[in-house]
Image (cartoon, grey):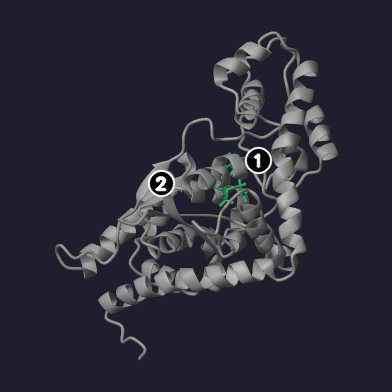
């Protein structure tokens, strides 16, 4: 039996940071040994919030280069740009026509982001979980790695597939395969450096809130120096009154490769003045090989274009076959 397939992606909406690395990319690097990975740059999703056309293409390439720099291996993974495979938008349209509006209005992320955007909220923001369903179902993955915040969208994906199968398939012959969620281990959520109760995010207006994967050592040092802490001496995990302390210790834990017990013992009597330089050095050392590889990839003319062209071809072969299956079930005449 071949390897099971997984699918995942990141939006090229800004600088990739430690949260994207520890919460997503690093897991893919581990999973690629056992799974056939389809990894994409979600550039169609990137325009559901205001975006700059001047930087979209470059950001998309940058994300692809960072996947490779962080250890994604083309022997095990296919990397492609979402907008290079038109089947995504076509299947999304077909899904939109069978998805009840109230399913989308009930999505927690929509409600939260809609409040923030007020009257400017786009129909794209409402319907993007349907595009996400198309992204996933086109590749018939066995599993989809998701964070807690995306669980509801994966359920919607399964609901859309089940509805299509029920309405247009026949008993025992489903048109679409329902993927299973692969929920990430706890502790994979990296929090903001300026507020330990908020997740580290590309769209946070303050660059001081995150460590970007391409930050040079002096920037990392500056950000850790400035990051929010508390006046308590002695550092410990899991104190709900000290979210920043928990977050920074967790970062040290995952990047140093030490166990939780080792870190707890090492840091229990430390003050911030002692811990911050240690964390800074650990982050710089963890990011150095990624940054070196990134520079090599970007310095090789035509390499990334070649990777993405090959990725598009591989992705398209699978995506088009699923799309044809769905169109056939919906009664479309297929091109000869
Ligand atoms: N802080 C985080 N901790 C752990 N994992 C995180 N991810 C994002 N932030 C953290 C994971 O990275 C992947 C990328 O997701 P995305 O770009 O599609 O959107 P997102 O989750 O909304 O990420 P950002 O960085 O917060 O982007 P913006 O600000 O543009 O919305 C996902 O697997 C996500 O779980």
> Which picture quadrant has residue 245?
top right
Whether residue 235 is situated above or below residue 186 in the rendered picture: above
Looking at the image, which residue is at 56% across and 60% down? 42
Residue extending farthest bottom: 336
Residue 241 can be seen in this image? no
**Residue, disc 2:** 152
Q: CA distance from mark 2 to mark 1?
A: 24 Å
Whole-percent x and y of residue 83?
56, 70
Q: Tell me the mark number nearer the camera, choosing from 2 and 1.
A: 1
Question: In the drawing, does residue 125 fall left or right of residue 139?
Answer: right
The residue lying toward the viewer, choosing from 121 and 78, is: 78
What percent of the width, then of the height, locates residue 217? Answer: 82, 38
Q: Is residue 302 left or right of residue 172?
A: right
Query: 157 above or below 112?
Result: below
Q: Is residue 214 left or right of residue 113?
A: right
Q: Is mark 1 within 8 Å of ligand 1?
A: yes
Q: Residue 293: give x, y in percent of width and height.
A: 71, 52
The secondary structure type at the circle numbered 2 is helix
Residue at horizontal 14%, vertical 64%?
171
Residue sitting at x 60%, y 35%: 190
Image quarter hosting the N terminus? bottom left
Secondary element under disc 1, as helix, strand or loop, is helix
Q: Is residue 204 or residue 311 the one in the foreground?
A: 311
**Tag 1 residue:** 18
Location of residue 307 (image quadrant): bottom right
Mark found first going from the N terminus, 2 or 1 = 1
Give the x, y percent position of residue 95. 37, 67
Q: Does the rendering let one see residue 319?
A: yes
**In front: 15, or 113?**
15
Question: Which residue does the image show at 56% across and 20% down from the upper left?
Answer: 260
């Amino acid at each position: 039996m071949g390897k099971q397939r997984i699918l995942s992606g990141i939006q090229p909406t800004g600088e990739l940071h430690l949260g994207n690395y520890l919460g997503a990319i690093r897991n893919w690097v581990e999973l690629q040994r056992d799974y056939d990975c389809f990894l994409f740059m979600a550039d169609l999703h990137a325009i559901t919030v205001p975006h700059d056309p001047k930087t979209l293409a470059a950001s998309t390439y940058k994300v692809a280069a960072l996947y490779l720099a962080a250890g994604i291996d083309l022997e095990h993974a296919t990397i492609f740009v979402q907008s290079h495979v038109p089947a995504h938008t076509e299947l999304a349209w077909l899904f939109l026509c069978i998805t009840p509006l109230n399913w989308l209005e009930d999505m927690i992320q929509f409600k939260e982001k809609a409040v923030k955007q007020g009257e400017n909220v786009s129909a794209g923001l409402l319907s993007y979980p349907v595009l996400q369903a198309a992204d996933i179902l086109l590749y018939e993955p066995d599993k989809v790695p998701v964070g807690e915040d995306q669980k509801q969208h994966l359920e919607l994906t399964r609901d859309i597939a089940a509805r299509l199968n029920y309405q247009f398939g026949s008993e025992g012959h489903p048109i679409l395969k329902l993927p299973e969620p692969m929920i990430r281990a706890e502790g994979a959520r990296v929090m903001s450096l300026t507020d330990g109760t908020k997740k580290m995010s590309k769209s946070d207006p303050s660059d001081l809130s995150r460590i970007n994967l391409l930050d040079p050592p002096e920037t990392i040092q500056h950000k850790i120096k400035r990051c929010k802490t508390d006046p308590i001496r002695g550092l410990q995990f899991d104190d709900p009154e000290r979210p920043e302390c928990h977050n920074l210790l967790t970062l040290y834990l995952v990047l140093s490769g030490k166990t939780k017990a080792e870190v707890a013992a090492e840091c229990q009597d430390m003050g911030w003045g002692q811990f911050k330089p240690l964390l800074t050095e650990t982050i710089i050392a963890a990011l150095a090989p990624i940054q070196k590889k990134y520079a090599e990839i970007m310095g090789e003319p035509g390499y990334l274009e070649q990777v993405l062209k090959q990725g598009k071809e591989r992705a398209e072969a699978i995506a088009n076959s699923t799309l044809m299956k769905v169109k056939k079930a919906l009664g479309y005449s297929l091109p000869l």
